[in-house]
C-alpha cells in the first residue's frame, strides 16, 4: 500500500470516527518541578529550559522514567505525549499509576502502555488495571491508534474515582470501567503515584518478542509536556486518613468524569474498529466474565474464545522490568488493520 493511500485511509477513518485532535480542555497544567521527580536513568531524562516538558531516552545502557512527587487517593492523570519515531520494536513507553513501591504484595495499578512499532506498521497499545496485588487477574485490552503518535503530541489521560475509571486519548474515551461491588479488592483503592517510563521489552513487546530493539536507531526518545495532576495528595502510611471527599467531588464535577452521547458514540466506533483483544471475551482465562464486564453482542461476535480477533494470532508471556509486573502478550495478524478499515 502506498504512503498516500495509507494516509488517505487514516483521514477517512478519522472523519468516520468523529474524533477530534484537540485535547481535553480547562486543565490545570503543571511544571516538572511542581509535580514530578526523576525515577531512574537520570542522564537520560532531559528537562526543557522552561521546565514545562521532559524527554525520556532509551539507549543501550539504560532507559529512564519519572514519578509524581506525591501519591494521590483517586485523581486525573494526564500528559501530552509524543512517541519515538522510526523503528521502535521492543521499546515500551508506559504512562501509568501504581503503588508497588509502598504496597509490594498488594499493589494497585492503572496502565497505558505503548508496545513498540515497526516503521510503517500501525502503533499498538494496551490499557490495564490491577487491584490489591491481583496480577494474575489482569484486565488487558489492546488496540491500534488511528494516528501516528510519533508525528505530533496527543493527550493521554487516566481518570480514577471511587466509582469509575476512564482511559482517554485526546477527547475520546476509549475504555470505561464502572466499579462493581462484586469486584471487591480487585478495584484499585489505595493511594497511587503517577509514573512514566521508557525501557527495553524486546522479549515480549512487539509480536511476542519476534522483533527486538535495534540500537542502531537509538536513542529512542519519548517527549512529555502539559502535565495535569488533579487529586487528593495523601501519605499512604499516616495514622489518620486524609479526608478526600472534596477532591472526589471536584473530579466528579469535571467534563472528563462524564461521557456525553457524541463521545460515547466515538468510543463505540473506536472499540469496533481498533480494539483487537479484550479480557472480557477471553473465556480461556475467564470462563465467566469478570463482574465489571459489559458484554456487547457485536463485540463478542468478532472475537474468539481467547478474546482475540477471529483472524488469528499468537500468545506469549513476557517478563516485566523496571518496576513493571508480568502480564501476557497477545498479538494478531499484521494485516488486521486493513481489514478493520474496510
Image: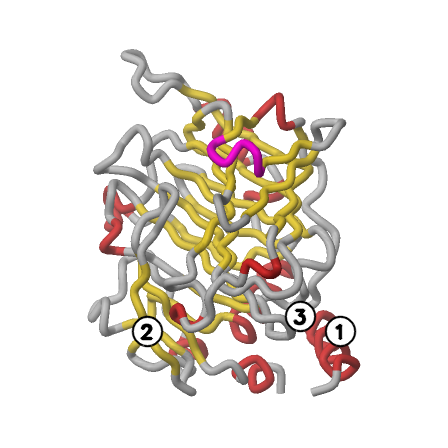
Image spot of residue 31 (x, y percent): 67, 27
Residue at the spot 24% in from the left edge and 50% down from the top edge: 182
As measured in the structure, the alpha-carbon distance from the residue carrying label 3 to the one carrying label 2 is 29 Å
Q: Nearer the viewer, residue 157 or 162?
A: 157
Could you say whether the residue bearing mark 2 is in a helix, strand or loop?
A: strand
Q: Earlier in the sequence, mark 3 or mark 2?
A: 3
Q: Is residue 33 above or below residue 184?
A: above
- Mark seen at residue 110: none
Q: Residue 31 lies in magenta, yes or no?
A: no
Dividing the picture into quadrants, the one containing residue 306 is bottom left
Residue 158 visible to an observer of this rendering: yes
What is the magenta range?
Answer: 39-44
Nearer to us of marks 3 and 1 is: 1
Residue under label 3:
17
Residue under label 2:
315
Numbered marks: total: 3
Q: Is residue 237 above or below residue 92?
A: above
Residue at the spot 30% in from the left edge and 53% down from the top edge: 326
Q: Which quarter of the figure is the C terminus placed in?
A: bottom right
Q: Earlier in the sequence, mark 2 or mark 1?
A: 1
Q: Residue 42 lies in magenta, yes or no?
A: yes
Dividing the picture into quadrants, the one containing residue 340 is bottom right
Q: Which quarter of the figure is the N terminus placed in?
A: bottom right
Could you say whether the residue bearing mark 3 is in a helix, strand or loop?
A: helix
As measured in the structure, the alpha-carbon distance from the residue carrying label 3 to the one carrying label 1 is 10 Å
Nearer to us of marks 2 and 1 is: 2
Do tag 2 and tag 1 residues touch (Cβ < 8 Å)? Answer: no
Q: Is residue 114 above or below residue 314?
A: above
As measured in the structure, the alpha-carbon distance from the residue carrying label 2 to the one carrying label 1 is 31 Å
Residue at the spot 47% in from the left edge and 49% down from the top edge: 199
Q: Residues within 10 Å of mark 1 (few under 14, many from 20)?
A: few
Residue under label 1:
11
Amino acid at each position: 500500500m502506498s504512503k498516500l493511500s495509507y494516509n488517505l485511509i487514516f483521514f477517512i477513518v478519522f472523519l468516520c470516527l468523529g474524533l477530534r485532535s484537540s485535547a481535553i480542555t480547562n486543565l490545570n497544567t503543571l511544571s516538572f518541578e511542581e509535580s514530578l521527580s526523576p525515577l531512574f536513568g537520570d542522564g537520560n531524562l532531559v528537562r526543557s529550559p522552561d521546565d514545562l516538558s521532559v524527554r525520556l531516552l532509551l539507549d543501550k545502557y539504560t532507559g529512564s522514567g519519572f514519578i509524581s512527587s506525591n501519591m494521590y487517593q483517586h485523581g486525573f492523570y494526564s500528559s501530552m505525549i509524543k512517541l519515538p519515531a522510526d523503528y521502535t520494536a521492543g521499546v515500551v513507553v508506559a504512562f501509568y499509576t501504581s503503588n508497588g513501591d509502598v504496597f509490594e504484595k498488594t499493589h494497585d495499578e492503572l496502565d497505558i502502555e505503548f508496545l513498540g512499532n515497526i516503521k510503517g506498521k500501525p502503533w499498538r497499545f494496551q490499557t490495564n488495571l490491577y487491584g490489591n496485588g491481583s496480577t494474575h487477574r489482569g484486565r488487558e485490552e489492546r488496540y491500534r491508534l488511528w494516528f501516528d503518535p510519533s508525528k505530533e503530541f496527543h493527550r493521554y489521560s487516566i481518570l480514577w474515582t471511587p466509582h469509575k475509571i476512564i482511559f482517554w486519548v485526546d477527547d475520546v474515551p476509549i475504555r470505561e470501567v464502572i466499579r462493581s461491588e462484586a469486584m471487591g479488592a480487585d478495584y484499585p483503592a489505595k493511594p497511587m503515584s503517577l509514573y512514566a517510563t521508557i525501557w527495553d521489552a524486546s522479549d515480549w513487546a512487539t509480536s511476542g518478542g519476534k522483533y527486538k530493539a535495534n540500537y542502531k536507531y537509538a536513542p529512542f526518545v519519548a517527549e512529555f509536556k502539559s502535565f495535569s495532576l488533579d487529586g487528593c495528595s495523601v501519605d499512604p502510611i499516616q495514622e489518620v486518613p486524609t479526608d478526600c471527599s472534596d477532591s472526589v467531588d471536584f473530579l466528579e464535577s469535571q467534563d472528563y468524569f462524564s461521557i456525553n452521547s457524541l463521545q460515547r458514540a466515538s468510543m463505540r466506533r473506536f472499540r469496533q474498529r481498533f480494539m483487537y483483544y479484550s479480557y472480557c471475551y477471553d473465556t480461556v482465562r475467564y470462563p465467566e466474565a469478570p463482574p465489571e464486564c459489559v458484554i456487547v453482542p457485536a463485540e463478542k461476535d468478532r472475537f474468539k474464545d481467547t478474546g482475540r480477533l477471529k483472524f488469528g494470532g499468537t500468545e506469549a508471556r513476557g517478563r516485566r522490568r523496571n518496576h513493571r509486573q508480568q502480564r501476557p502478550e497477545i498479538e494478531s495478524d499484521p494485516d488486521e488493520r486493513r481489514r478493520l478499515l474496510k
